[in-house]
């Protein structure tokens, strides 16, 4: 392979290194114009009835499903993945996703009445309502060029906002395709797309957006969150991962091997929630590793005929990280029991299993983002838990066992945002469940009603229908102290205080009215 490090990101197909059509980089003025156009269309959209917004989002999901062949082709060209993999991961669930996202939005956007004590706050009522923030910017990575947008698109538009999408420089065409579908079902101008790399993401932040959804690496996430902090706009930052699976001796071996391979190798491990570390109890380590290695050795990397299991690395930079991690692990004593090498014609890397890994290896401590499973043999579940938690990241964690109660208890002790038993990361396509992490994975929450602070602000509405003044208003006089005392005692459950309050009420109102001239 010739030196591709100088090639413009996203200009070659990772599958066969053939050139892709040129995509223009948006200028700062074009980015600013996109935000202005979205803001102007948002004024009406923000007042549209909820049912109308839901209708538009259902139409969007329908368009994704109906035009899935077209979307799949765009994605295949940019990612090099197998068509079926693209379809399964990014498109095929669009209808269910929309239905669930709409259900979540109804909870998040519902007006909330606030109960107020009629004794302390007579004649008053209050409620909290959701108000669109304005224009939301979504800055996305390349690894799931549709899915990573959906978790922001639905709450942003259902919440009444305008939207500017900034796809990764590696997958701009998919972002444009997606924006095109949205533009057909929403008012003119409401949804915009800008293309280019980090400088375009920066320009978007500087263009007056009212909230940002960022998904990507930790270093970029820090910069985006810091700038959003300075701008005082909400920022949801969903960053890297280094997910661990704990395999207990009583697991269903065949299912566990298939499950770990699935969640470790799909999308070539280019998944923030890919299993990258496998802590396996000594008692089952030998047969587990043998079966996992045999499984991995049979997996095929796209482009393959007629079907392949996962695609190539997205970029030469990503491929270099994977190779470097494997090389370093081997130098430090890990054993390659499956894969370990590139596969052509593009940027493919074989499904790789490394046995006898340790916490000191990069393949265990840093995000590899490749089709590499690092197996760490441990003496028992407690050691597995301690080592699994010894990580900078905390997205998903899973325990594989037939003892569901024990598995659940152990999974809940993992320092992660999503704890699972006998499954891993599936909740990413279930928009009623929060997708969230801890530590350097970031504090962002996407999906579910818990994601909405990025998309709507809360407005409190407080209405006082009292015709007269409230008894605690100025001026203070000799009745003020006993009145406040009675208020306190009444909250302590002393019924005599209630009668005292009623007695003092007249005095207080008289004092206020005499000063106010009522
Ligand atoms: P990246 O940080 O390089 O880029 C992400 C996006 O940010 C791209 O659109 C990029 O153009 C833009 N960008 C770069 N510099 C910027 C800046 N200074 N200001 C604003 N925008 C800027 O990440 P990537 O390589 O595209 O994606 C891979 C990373 O994403 C991995 O670390 C992965 O774990 C993470 N990821 C996390 C989740 C999650 O839900 N936690 C999901 C998918 C991917």
Image (tube, helix red, strand yellow):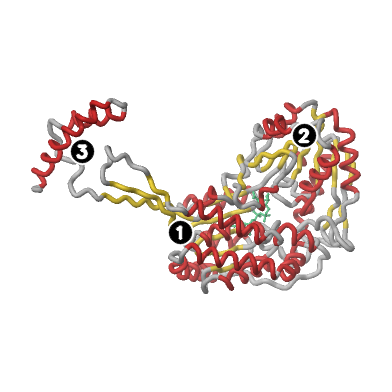
Pointer 1 residue? 132
Q: Are the residues flagged by discs 2 and 1 in contact, CB closer than 8 Å?
A: no
- Label 2 or label 1, whichever lies nearer to me, is 2
Mark 2 → mark 1, Cα distance in angstroms: 45 Å
The residue at 57%/59% (across/down) is 154
Q: Are the residues flagged by discs 3 and 2 in contact, CB closer than 8 Å?
A: no
| Relative height, residue 355 to residue 124 (above, below) | above
For label 3, the SS is loop
Residue in front for this viewpoint, 399 or 140: 399
Q: Are the residues flagged by discs 3 and 1 in contact, CB closer than 8 Å?
A: no
N-terminal-most mark, 3 or 1: 1
- Quadrant in the picture for residue 99: bottom right
Residue in front for this viewpoint, 91 or 377: 91
Crowd tier of the residue under label 1, counting other residues whose Cα lies within 10 Å: few below 14, some 14–19, many 20 or above: many
Mark 3 → mark 2, Cα distance in angstroms: 62 Å
Res. 472 mark? 3
Relative placement, left or right, of 321 versus 115 is right
N-terminal-most mark, 2 or 1: 1
Pointer 2 residue? 401
- Label 3 or label 1, whichever lies nearer to me, is 3
For label 2, the SS is loop
- Residue 299 locus on image (x, y percent): 87, 52
Crowd tier of the residue under label 2, counting other residues whose Cα lies within 10 Å: few below 14, some 14–19, many 20 or above: many
| Relative height, residue 141 to residue 498 (above, below) | below
- Quadrant in the picture for residue 497: top left
- Residue 59 locus on image (x, y percent): 60, 68
């Amino acid at each position: 392979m010739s030196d591709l490090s100088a090639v413009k990101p996203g200009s070659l197909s990772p599958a066969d290194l053939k050139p892709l059509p040129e995509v223009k980089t948006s200028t700062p003025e074009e980015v600013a114009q996109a935000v202005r156009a979205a803001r102007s269309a948002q004024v009406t959209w923000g007042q549209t009835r909820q049912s109308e917004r839901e209708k538009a989002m259902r139409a969007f999901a329908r368009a994704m499903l109906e035009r899935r062949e077209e979307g799949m082709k765009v994605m295949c060209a940019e990612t090099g993945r197998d068509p079926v993999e693209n379809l399964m991961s990014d498109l095929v669930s669009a209808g269910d996703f929309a239905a669930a996202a709409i259900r979540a939005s109804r909870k998040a956007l519902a007006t909330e009445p606030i109960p107020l004590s009629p004794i302390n706050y007579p004649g008053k009522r209050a409620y909290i309502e959701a108000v669109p923030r304005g224009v939301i910017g979504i800055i996305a990575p390349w690894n799931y060029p549709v899915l990573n947008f959906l978790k922001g698109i639905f709450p942003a538009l259902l919440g009444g906002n305008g939207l500017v999408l900034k796809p990764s420089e590696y997958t701009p065409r998919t972002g444009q395709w997606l924006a095109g579908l949205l533009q057909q079902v929403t008012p003119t101008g409401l949804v915009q797309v800008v293309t280019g790399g980090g400088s375009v993401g920066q320009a978007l932040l500087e263009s007056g957006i009212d909230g940002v959804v960022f998904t990507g690496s930790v270093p970029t996430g820090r910069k985006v969150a810091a700038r959003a902090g300075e701008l005082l706009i909400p920022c949801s930052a969903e960053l890297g991962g280094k997910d661990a699976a704990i395999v207990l001796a009583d697991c269903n071996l065949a299912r566990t091997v298939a499950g770990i391979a699935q969640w470790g190798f799909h999308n070539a491990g280019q998944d923030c929630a890919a299993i990258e570390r496998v802590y396996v109890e000594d008692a089952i380590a030998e047969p587990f590793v043998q079966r996992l290695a045999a499984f991995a050795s049979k997996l095929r990397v796209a482009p393959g005929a007629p079907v392949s299991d996962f695609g190539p690395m997205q970029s030469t930079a990503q491929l270099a990280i994977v190779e470097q991690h494997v090389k370093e692990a081997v130098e430090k004593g890990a054993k390659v029991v499956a894969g370990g090498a590139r596969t052509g014609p593009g940027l493919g890397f074989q499904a790789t299993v490394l046995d006898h890994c340790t916490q000191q290896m990069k393949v265990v401590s840093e995000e590899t983002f490749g089709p590499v499973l690092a197996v760490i043999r441990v003496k028992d579940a407690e050691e597995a838990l301690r080592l699994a938690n010894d990580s900078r990241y905390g997205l998903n964690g899973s325990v594989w066992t037939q003892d569901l109660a024990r598995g659940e208890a152990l999974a809940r002790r993992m320092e992660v945002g999503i704890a699972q038993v006998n499954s891993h990361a599936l909740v990413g396509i279930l928009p009623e469940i929060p997708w969230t992490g801890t530590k350097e994975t970031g504090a962002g929450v996407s999906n579910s009603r818990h994601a909405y602070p990025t998309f709507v602000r809360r407005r409190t509405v407080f209405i006082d229908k009292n015709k007269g003044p409230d008894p605690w208003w100025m001026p203070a006089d000799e009745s003020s102290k006993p009145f406040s005392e009675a208020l306190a005692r009444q909250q302590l459950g002393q019924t005599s205080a209630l009668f005292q309050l009623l007695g003092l009420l007249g005095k207080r109102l008289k004092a206020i009215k005499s000063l106010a001239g009522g």
